[in-house]
Image (cartoon, rainbow, N blue to C red):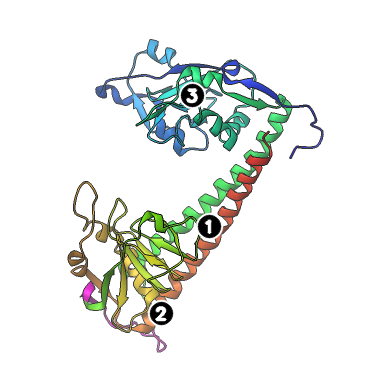
Amino acid sequence: MRFPGFKESWELKKLGELLEFKNGINASKEQYGSGIKFINVLDILSNDFITYENIVGKVNVDEKTIEKFLVSYGDVLFQRSSETREEVGTANVYLDKNKNATFGGFVIRGRKIGDYNPIFFNKLLKTNSARENITSKSGGSTRFNVGQEILSSVNLYFPNLFEQDKIASFLSIIDERIQTQKKIIEGLQALMKGNLERVFYQKLRFKNKQGNYFSDWKTIKLDEICDIKKGEQLNKEDLTETGNYPCLNGGMSFSGYTDKFNSNENTITISEGGNSCGFVSFMKSKFWLGGHCYKIILKKDISTDFFFYLLKFYEREIMNLRVGSGLPNIQQKDLKNLQLLVSQDIEEQTKIANFLSSIQEKIEIEKQILEKLELQKKFLLSNLFV
């Protein structure tokens, strides 16, 4: 796929023709926390591109060191080492024309010495072919590493500057649309958070058909309302990348897929173990409940949707029940004793659930739009680059 008017063949170039490489600052722990901003691995991994404002860390060094390790507009930063081959050599570009930064010891800077469009170059370095080109050259056993010589030897195809500018401009429009979509979702999520608090702190009350407020809510222990059942562990070899039923096993996303299920649709789950223990989910379809996850089986005549939103409101309190340091977990006995302030009227529960679901449905629609935009970007990245 090419833009009209461009027929010239792309030219194979070594990164060493375009970039001059240097390892970053190794400072003492006392030097961190103040001074000039410095780029670390997290900045490379967490951003589409890097500016001074979105850099997290600071380091206190003298002017001579700053000059030696300066990062300017168009410079490229590479992750020097990683526990996984997939991440080593991950690259990002510095796109701040107003302020310079510096960079840390786990990062390699590629100083711009050749002609290229930095936005185009950033996209190129994120393509599958470029990533494979870099990671295949990495060395190490417990940790994978790339050095200056390896990066200098990497060959990539480049069009002329005019075509680079055209591709960069087009992809920037897609990126801006994606960022706008993310802000829409963030705004709706903030709206949901605010309304959860208004409803369950009872600052927002609903009225019955007679125009009166519903009866007072009551404080009830979780095990008076529901049974809590732990799932059954599946071996890794029993999971596939595709299948009829997702497996939920303690994390915030699926562990994989299987062709059998042990839990029905419209089930509330709570993560039992791991860094995300206490996370509350709602499964709309049949699924496999793993060994590091609980499911909620309601005893009383209570709205499932209402109860899900109630538990999302109490999610932080649930997470605070975690014990253990290595692999934290939430014990069933502690979960059972959790005190909840609960509406006693099914009509009020339904009104609350409908109100909050209207916001959640909007969030899901906007997430689907974002997913389509991300797929569009992925398609373009794989087809606009040789």
Residue situated furthest bottom in the rendering: 210
* Residue shown at 62% from the left, 26% from the top: 156
Q: Nearer the viewer, mark 2 or mark 3?
A: 2
| Amino acid at circle 1 | Lys
Regarding residue 40, the answer to whether it shows in the image is no
Quarter location, residue 201:
bottom left
User: What's the magenta region?
Assistant: 207-223
| Amino acid at circle 3 | Lys
Quarter location, residue 239:
bottom left
Q: Which residue is mark 1?
A: 367
Regarding residue 178, the answer to whether it shows in the image is yes
Secondary structure category for the residue under label 2: helix
Query: Quick check: 337 left or right of 146?
Result: left
Task: Identify whether 44 is placed above or below 272.
Answer: above
- Image position, residue 97 (x, y; %): 55, 25
Q: Nearer the viewer, mark 1 or mark 3?
A: 1
* Residue shown at 38% from the left, 33% from the top: 56
